[in-house]
C-alpha cells in the first residue's frame, strides 16, 4: 500500500513539473528573449518550483553542499538524473552547459539553452565546438561564467561504472582554468528513467577546486577519484550501496 501511494504521488509530481515547464517558459519569455538575466530567472524559478514540490509531494529534500564557485571556472559533474542539472544550475550565478545538440530540439529546454549560450555539440564534432567556444570566450563574444561538463557524457545510474571521457581533460587544458568537481547521489531518489521518486535528501556537492596547469592524464585521474569517492559516500547516506551493483 505504501509503495502504491508513493508511486501515485510520484506520478502526480512528474505530471505537474512537465505541465509547469511551458508555463514558466511562456511567462518569462518577454524578458528572457531580450536578456540573459530573464532567461536565468526563468530557469532558476522553475528549478526552485521543482525543489519545493519535490519536498512537498514526494519527500525529496534538495541540499547543496560545498562552495559553489562565483567566477569563471570549469565544472566537471557527475550526472545521474534531471534533478542534478537543476540543482547545479540554481546554485551558480552564470551557469551554462555543454550538451548534446539534439537537446536544442526539446521544447522550452532547447530554446532557453540557446538563450543562455549553452554549448551544443554533435557527437562526432565535440572538439570543433569546444574550440569555437574557447575562442568566443577569449574574444568577448560569449559571456564568462561557469561552464559545466558531464565527464561521463551521459546520465549514469547509481553504482554503474562508466568511463570518464577525455573531452573534459581537453577542455581543462584549453581553458587554462581551475576545475571544480561535483559529486551527487540524486539518482538514488530520482532515477534517470521511470516514475517512482523515493523520499530522502538529494545532495549535490561542490568539491575543492583542482588547480589549472596539471597534466591531462593526472588531472583526469584526480577528477575521477574525487568525484566517484564522494558520490559513493553520498549514495551510502541515503541507504544505497554502490559496491553491491554488478
Image (tube, grey):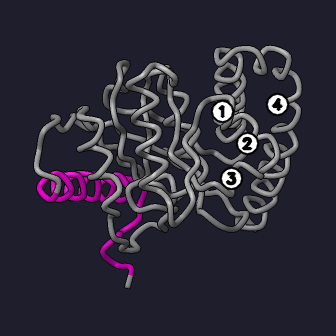
For label 2, the SS is helix
Task: Give the magenta range.
Answer: 217-245
Inter-mark Cα distance, 1 to 4: 12 Å
Q: Are marks 2 and 4 in contact (CB under 8 Å)?
A: no
Q: Quadrant of residue 178?
A: top left
Which quadrant does the N terminus fall into?
A: bottom right
**Residue that carries the numbered disc 4 in the rendered image:** 25
Separation of residues labelled 2 and 4 (CA atoms):
9 Å
Q: Which residue is mark 2?
A: 109
Q: Which residue is mark 1?
A: 47
Q: Which residue is mark 3?
A: 103
Residue placed at 72% from the left, 30% from the top? Answer: 46
Say what secondary structure mark 4 lies in: helix
Marks 2/1: CA–CA distance: 12 Å
* Label 2, residues with CA under 10 Å away: few <14, some 14-19, many ≥20: some
Q: Are marks 2 and 1 in contact (CB under 8 Å)?
A: no
Asked if 154 appears above or below 82 in the picture, the reply is below
Q: Is residue 229 magenta?
A: yes
Q: Nearer the viewer, residue 139 or 146?
A: 139
Query: What residue is shown at x 55% (from left), y 28% (from top)?
Result: 90
Give the quarter of the figure containing the C terminus.
Answer: bottom left
Amino acid at each position: 500500500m505504501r509503495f502504491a501511494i508513493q508511486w501515485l504521488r510520484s506520478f502526480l509530481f512528474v505530471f505537474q513539473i512537465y505541465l509547469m515547464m511551458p508555463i514558466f517558459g511562456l511567462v518569462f519569455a518577454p524578458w528572457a528573449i531580450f536578456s540573459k538575466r530573464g532567461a536565468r530567472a526563468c530557469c532558476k524559478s522553475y528549478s526552485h518550483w521543482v525543489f519545493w514540490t519535490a519536498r512537498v509531494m514526494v519527500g525529496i529534500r534538495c541540499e547543496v553542499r560545498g562552495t559553489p564557485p562565483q567566477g569563471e571556472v570549469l565544472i566537471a559533474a557527475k550526472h545521474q538524473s534531471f534533478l542534478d542539472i537543476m540543482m547545479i544550475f540554481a546554485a551558480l550565478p552564470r551557469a551554462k552547459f555543454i550538451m548534446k545538440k539534439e537537446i536544442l530540439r526539446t521544447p522550452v529546454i532547447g530554446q532557453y539553452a540557446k538563450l543562455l549560450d549553452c554549448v551544443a555539440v554533435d557527437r562526432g564534432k565535440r572538439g570543433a565546438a569546444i574550440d569555437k567556444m574557447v575562442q568566443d570566450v577569449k574574444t568577448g563574444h560569449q559571456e564568462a561564467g561557469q561552464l559545466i561538463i558531464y565527464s561521463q557524457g551521459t546520465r549514469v545510474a547509481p553504482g554503474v561504472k562508466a568511463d570518464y571521457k577525455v573531452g573534459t581533460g581537453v577542455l581543462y587544458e584549453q581553458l587554462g582554468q581551475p576545475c571544480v568537481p561535483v559529486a551527487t547521489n540524486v539518482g538514488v531518489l530520482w532515477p534517470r528513467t521511470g516514475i517512482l521518486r523515493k523520499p530522502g535528501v538529494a545532495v549535490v556537492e561542490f568539491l575543492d577546486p583542482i588547480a589549472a596547469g596539471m597534466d591531462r592524464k593526472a588531472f583526469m585521474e584526480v577528477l575521477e577519484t574525487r568525484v566517484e569517492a564522494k558520490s559513493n559516500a553520498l549514495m551510502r547516506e541515503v541507504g544505497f550501496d554502490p559496491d553491491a551493483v554488478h
